[in-house]
Image: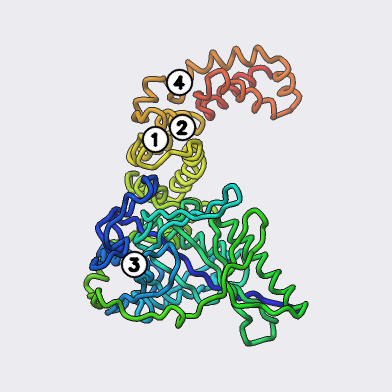
Amino acid sequence: MTYIAVIGLETHVQLNTNSKMFSSSSAKYQNSEPNTLVDPTTMGLPGALPVVNIKAVESAIKIGIALDCSIAESTKFDRKQYFYPDLMKGYQISQFDEPICINGFIILEKKNNKKIRINRVHMEEDVAKLTHINSNGNSYSILDINRSGTPLMEIVTEPDLGSSDEVIEYIESLQKIIRYIKVGSANMEEGSFRCDANISVKEESEKKLGTKVEIKNMNRISAVAEAVDYEIKRQINNIENNIKIIQETRGWSEERKKTIPQRTKEESNDYRYFPEPDIPPLTIKSSWIEKIRNELPVLPQKRKEKYIKNYQLNDYDASLLTNDINFSDFFDKTINFLPKKLQNNETIKYLANLMNGEFNRLLNSNSNMEFYKIKFTEKDLAELIQIYKSNKINNKILKNVFEQMWNTGENPEKIITNNNMSIVTDTDELESTIYNIIESNPKAIEDFLSGKEQSKKFLLGQVMRATKGQADPSVSNSLINKILDKKK
């Protein structure tokens, strides 16, 4: 029997606004003392009224545009009723039947450009943080209200995903988009990007979907993949053994590497949604949407297509360059600083190799390194490429200069001049050095005379070593040939 998995994802993206969704308290709760970022609205005190954070609405529109959604002309908030200790009001302000964004998609390039449909993007507030403690046989929970009220965007897919590989690519693509448009950090480990998976399994020939199970508590991408794979196998095993699959919420146990039951899955009517009486519907003008659209950066997929089409870069190099918007921007700005005659595919490919190689190596050598800490500018890097292309330095010297630029921030021309690093092209200066090297290697002369051309490469290597890589290879080769020819 062949089974297929049907997977939909619900992703909560925490926004990086300064204040909370419906109050003026700080939303920067990380590293804050517990229960210090509180206010009457956050705590649900009687008489406290919510005020919508306009920056959060703008971020929601950005996400919608980036995901090719339709943006609602009018949207409203609703009260979602449920009674857990992490929600002091007894309800959450969310959106039910009139979300701000609908009908978008994300393309999975690794899966033959499979389209994953986005059902909706809606705005809501986060809940407080509960920490469960077991000590001396006693169990209790402590509450930190700081996170409560932080703006969240929930992005809900259609059940279009079919494997953990597709889930991983979707999550990584969504994270990249969120970071490109700079509305959040999309960091799973810190809790600012949380993903729940709705999974069902059915026979391949069956049209009706199987019973859906929701999986929570996954704080790493690899954990999401493990949980999805485990749950698919569990459901298949249940079907084959005539064990009923219950519609429920299950949690992922990192220690036990399995999903465990948490509670019976609620339906939407269990939440008793009704329009939020303290917040009137929001009207979103098309002029505001277009203003936001025009301010958004070119997104990773479009950039990648441009790099491949315009610069003839391969898929791998283009993917590396577009992984991070700051990295991609640095690449683009460096190209713009190059003279027009050097804005050709050959030079741009060399720049791409340098950035994906040495630049990336130095950037990743320090886990705390951020782009704003880089000591040189795009103009400096363009100048270094220009110097290299004018044959004043070779590739080895360029890498040496680049590392000194990274460490000191000094101008490349200054580094080359101060350290006497230019290529040596003067024949008089090189001839004496090369003559001494040839005379010191009689075996190489013997090999040359017996017809072994490899001896010339050996001698050139000795010249480069003696000159610390600064000898011009073409001039050196000519001099080696000249001196060896006299030995015949």
The amino acid marked with disc number 3 is: Ala
Front tag of 2 and 4: 2
Q: Residues within 10 Å of mark 3 (few under 14, many from 20)?
A: many
Residues at marks 2 and 4, CA–CA distance in whole angstroms: 20 Å
The tag earlier along the polypeptide, 1 or 2, is 1
Q: Residue furthest bottom?
A: 207
Residues at marks 2 and 3, CA–CA distance in whole angstroms: 45 Å
SS for dot 2 = helix
The tag earlier along the polypeptide, 1 or 3, is 3
Front-most of residues 486 and 45: 45
Q: Residues within 10 Å of mark 2 (few under 14, many from 20)?
A: many
The amino acid marked with disc number 2 is: Leu
Q: Residue at x 26, y 67 (%)?
A: 46
Asked where in the image residue 198 lies, by quadrant, the reply is bottom right
The amino acid marked with disc number 4 is: Asp
Identify the residue under disc 3.
60
* Label ID, residue 426: 4
Circles 3 and 4 in contact, beta carbons < 8 Å: no
Q: Residue at x 26, y 70 (%)?
A: 290
SS for dot 3 = helix
Q: Quadrant of the N terminus?
A: bottom right
The tag earlier along the polypeptide, 3 or 4, is 3
Q: Is residue 7 visible?
A: no
Circles 1 and 2 in contact, beta carbons < 8 Å: yes
Q: Position of residue 283 (x, y in %)?
A: 23, 77
Q: Position of residue 466 (x, y in %)?
A: 56, 17
Residues at marks 1 and 2, CA–CA distance in whole angstroms: 7 Å
Identify the residue under disc 2.
398
Identify the residue under disc 1.
384
Q: Position of residue 482 (x, y in %)?
A: 59, 22
Q: Quadrant of the C terminus?
A: top right
Q: Position of residue 104 (x, y in %)?
A: 42, 74
